[in-house]
Image (cartoon, rainbow, N blue to C red):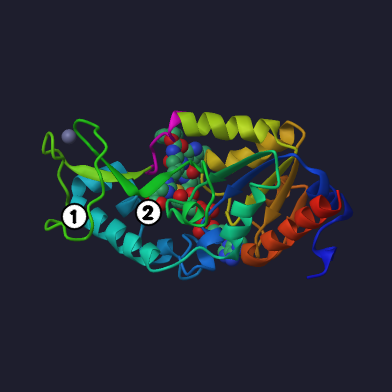
Amino acid sequence: MNASLFSERLEHLLATVHSVTVLTGAGVSAESGVPTFRDPGGLWSQFRPEELANVDAFMRNPQLVWEWYTYRKRMISDVSPNPGHFALAEMEGFVGDFTLLTQNVDNLHQRAGSSDVVELHGNIHHRFCMDCGQDAVEIDGSERSVVPRCVSCGGLLRPGVVWFGEMLPGEQLRRASDAAARCQLFLSIGTSGEVYPAAQLPSLAREHGAYVVEINPRSSSIAHRMHECIEGVSGIVVPAMLEIMRRARRTA
Ligand code: BV8
Ligand code: ZN
């Protein structure tokens, strides 16, 4: 892989940087076989988000929504992290201040070994009670009823993800904004930049002086806010970035 993928400035930054913040979207899991949302054949071409990923839809038809999340969970459990996930997990060890923010609920970053992942939109394996709010442990597929109930109050359990129209978890949003505002290099990987407030983070980083880079085979809706756009897939580009870091630290 010739280094010309990256500008001189980015090559130098990768070799010397000590504070990196990364934002990932569905694209980073595409090479693992997890469909993205907005790409051709993506989830939103098969299902309508307003019918599935919001609380009114859940109250209208909890069975339908649970079936959809069970279908996605099964799909996710049948796949494995890809070289993009593994390179990000390894990058953590090369950079003093490294923060991984994700919009993904698929747990693949954690399965690749990334620690302390900031999950902006929750996690598909989490669930909690609509009535008493209690977190509930995930039981394997042996559950009889598709719509699980809370063991302490009998209330409806819902997936521990952030639905459209719902605020992101405050702690995660605060950590994400802090990490975006303090980093030297911000990488936006595999996201279309269409979902807010996550799509605001690259601009926040740029406003605070970071060098902001997009990795995406197609220009996203926020490409114009980047200093540099790498047109490629994360499973190739992120390992190439890691190689520059590894080489620089070997010769340091
Ligand atoms: C909220 C969890 C306060 C559930 C998800 C400002 C302007 C406009 C609208 C809004 C706004 N502020 C708020 C809104 C409303 C809304 C929003 O943004 N709507 C959009 C659609 C217009 N935001 C919200 O509702 C948020 N809450 O704002 O609360 C509030 C409340 C009320 C009213 C106002 C404000 C909550 C948003 C979170 C929703 N939950 N997921 C679940 O997963 O089931 S979002 C879900 O979709 C994912 O988590 C993900 O974040 C998003 C999909 O985006 P991407 O990950 O980017 O995926 P996508 O398919 O779009 O793109 C994939 C990209 O990868 C492509 O660019 C492709 O080219 C690239 N790619 C493909 N292969 C590869 C690749 N890249 C690299 N390598 C490859 N191999
Ligand atoms: Zn309960």
Q: Is residue 197 visible?
A: yes
User: Which amino acid lies under the numbered mark 1 shown in the image of this protein?
Assistant: Gln
Q: Is mark 2 within 8 Å of ligand 1?
A: yes
Q: Count the marks: how many?
A: 2
Answer above or below: position of 189 versus 128.
below
Q: Secondary structure at mark 2?
A: helix
Where residue 101 appears, x then y in whole percent?
55, 43
Number of the label disc, if any, that sits on residue 63: 1
Mark closer to the chain start, 2 or 1: 2
Q: Is residue 61 visible?
A: no
Locate the N terminus by quadrant: bottom right
Where residue 54 appears, x then y in whole percent?
33, 45
* Residue marked by disc 2: 49
Is 93 displayed left or right of 78 in the figure? Answer: right
Answer above or below: position of 243 versus 225.
below
For the record, the magenta segment spans: 162-170
Task: Give the residue drawn at x 51%, y 61%.
Answer: 29
